[in-house]
Amino acid sequence: MNLDLLSSGALNVVDIIGKRFGRWTVISYAGKDKYHNKLVLVQCDCGTQKVHRLYNVEVGETHECITCARKKIKGRKNNYPKDRKRRC
């Protein structure tokens, strides 16, 4: 599917309801913002719902909620040796 067609409005927003983009699932159309960008209500796999611009969701600029992003970062281990001396 061509992303340019979706964001330009060639396809109806109803066509992408229920589709997944990263961890987001499009639930419904939420209108337009003051710049006339299409807004959609999306739900993350963890259950968080948020309104995002349709274009940002399509191109992957936003692909998960902040809660999932923080969990992913928290799960990482730092690779520094424990005996490493601090720099002055």
Image (cartoon, rainbow, N blue to C red):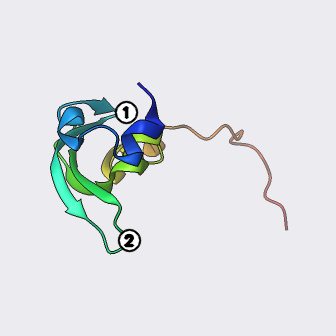
Residue 27 in the image, given as x and y percentages of width and height? 15, 42
When the figure is inspected, residue 73 is found, relative to residue 19, above or below; the finding is: below
Q: Which residue is drawn at 24% across and 30% down?
A: 19
Residue pushed farthest right? 88
- Residue occupying the far front of the picture: 10
- Under circle 1, the secondary element is loop
Q: Residue 22 carries which label?
A: 1
Label 2 environment density (alpha carbons within 10 Å; few <14, some 14–19, many ≥20) = few
Total number of numbered discs in the rendering: 2
Residue drawn 19% across the image and 49% down it: 48
Q: Which residue is tagged 2?
A: 35
Q: What residue type is labelled 2?
A: Tyr
Q: Which quarter of the figure is the N terminus placed in?
A: top left
Which callout, 2 or 1, points at the residue further toward the start of the chain?
A: 1
* CB-based contact (under 8 Å), mark 2 and mark 1: no
Mark 1 belongs to which amino acid?
Answer: Gly
